[in-house]
Image (cartoon, helix red, strand yellow):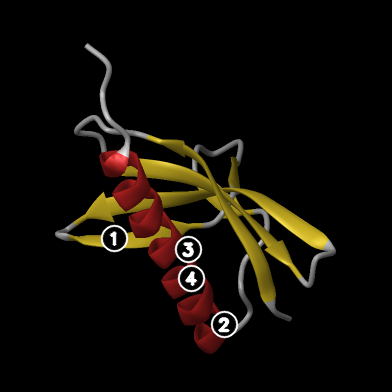
Amino acid sequence: MKITDIKIRKVFDDESPMKAVVSVTFDDQLALHDVKVIYAKEKHFIVMPSKKNPDGSYRDIAHPINSEFRDELNDAVLTAYFEELKNLEAIPVEQ
């Protein structure tokens, strides 16, 4: 399965750990929404979409099956996120 598109849906510029919400398309046929970019413990990583269980815990709705694909997805999303940050910095702020 190939990652064919990554869209940064929203970027958060506050001090919260959540930095972005992302959608990823696979093989131009399947979209995965609400992947989150998180910054915690001095590193960035992704969190898969999840739902809250009745006991208050969370369970991933969709997730990679193996660590190799998880790493590939993590690297691709973070690359797109940092590229988006560069693009946002290049936009002049109106005064």
| Res. 47 in view | yes
Residue 60 pos. (x, y %)? 60, 56
Residues under labels 1 and 3: Cα distance?
A: 10 Å
| Kind of element beneath mark 3 | helix
* Residue under label 4: 76
Question: Considering depth in this image, is 3 or 83 the residue closer to the camera?
Answer: 83
Left or right of residue 77, residue 7 in this image: right
For marks 1 and 3 on the same chain, the one whose residue lies earlier in the sequence: 1
Q: Are marks 4 and 3 in contact (CB under 8 Å)?
A: yes
Question: Could you classify mark 2 by the number of other residues whose Cα lies within 10 Å: few (under 14), some (14-19), or many (20 or more)?
Answer: some
Residue at the image point whose x is 69% and y is 79% from the top: 2
Residue at the image point whose x is 40% and y is 66% from the top: 79
For marks 4 and 1 on the same chain, the one whose residue lies earlier in the sequence: 1
Residues under labels 4 and 1: Cα distance?
A: 12 Å
Question: Considering depth in this image, is 29 or 55 the residue closer to the camera?
Answer: 29
Identified by mark 4, the residue type is: Ala
The residue most toward the right is 29
Residue 17 pos. (x, y %)? 27, 42
Residue at the image point whose x is 27% and y is 30% from the top: 92
